[in-house]
Image: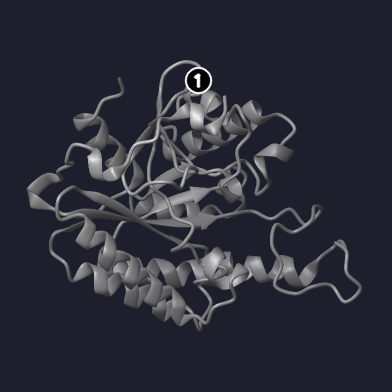
Amino acid sequence: MLPNERLKYSPISQRKALTLPNGARCVVWVIVNIEEWNPLETMPRTVLTPPAGGAPMPDIPNWAWHEYGNRVGFWRIVDVLDQLGLPAALAINGSAIAAYEPISRAALDRKWEFMGHGFSQKNMQKVANEREDIVKTRQAIADFTGRPPRGWLGPGLTETWETPDILVEEGYDYVCDWVLDDQPVWLKTKTKPILNVPYTQECNDVAMMLIQHHTAAEYRNRAVDQFEQIYADAAGSARVMALVVHPYIMGAPHRLRYFREALEHIKKHSDVLFWTGEQIHDWYVGNNPAA
């Protein structure tokens, strides 16, 4: 099924108004990505290019760069969220549940939502058996948390032609890969529809820091600017904004303050809800069930 066959074009200005509880204007949700990088494979991203090029193994500098995020950076992010009293959604590789059990435990203790993020950090097009990968991820999360995940975020937002179909068939309620709207949208599948919850490529530290090579303050500046526009847009109909962080990027010492400052700015608005993906899903479905 082609992407434009999964959903119809719908201008946001011509939809019925969405309303949030207690007069809230918009929802912000924070997604923390936890990944396990396999040292026997090419690193998903790099901070240093090998002197002679190629993809040498072991790739110690780039593996260690990522590992720092899980050993140190994650705990800085946790401190910020704890201090501000905010929830998060943990998008986690299935294999990372056990590999970084203290991270999984910290998220579980805080009642964060666990989202499937592939069993390993690899493009879904390169996974040997996509359905098996999705099921293994679901099972790893269910075994640890006591319940299966409801949401899915593909590694690097990657999908095959069949991903939404498989997700529905394997019990997932929503997906975040289709970054094309400020409100949830229904996607058609071979069976029943699946909801796409708004995610972000713009307020995402991978894009800003690793691809566009901005200074650390860009995260705060862009998040604040994006929030102010979405907040204004929400005057007539509710909107959803996502903020995405990876511990090896925004958990770095020189970047963390800008993540905190962005959240502090948004939190000053009393009519903004900080929810998780499943809360957004349940609110939307309760008011806009699939046809």
Asked whether, in this view, residue 86 is left or right of residue 167, the answer is: left
The image quarter in which residue 290 lies: top left
Residue 276 rendering spot, x and y as whole percentages: 32, 48
Q: Is residue 80 left or right of residue 50?
A: left
Quarter of the image for the C terminus: give it. top left
The number of callouts visible is 1
Q: Nearer the viewer, residue 153 or 222?
A: 222
Residue 275 at x, y percent in the picture: 27, 51
Front position in the image: 35 or 182:
182
In the image, residue 56 sits, relative to residue 147, either above or below, namely below
* Residue tagged 1: 169
Q: Extreme top residue here?
A: 191
Q: Residue at x 50, y 84 (%)?
A: 254
Protein image colouring = one colour
Say few, some or many: other residues with alpha carbon within 10 Å of mark 1 (under 14 / 14 to 19 / 20 or more). Answer: some
Quarter of the image where one finds residue 163: top right
**Image point (16%, 67%), residue name:** 269
Quarter of the image with the N terminus is top right
Position in image of residue 96 (x %, y %): 59, 49
Q: Reply above or below: 172 against 55.
A: above
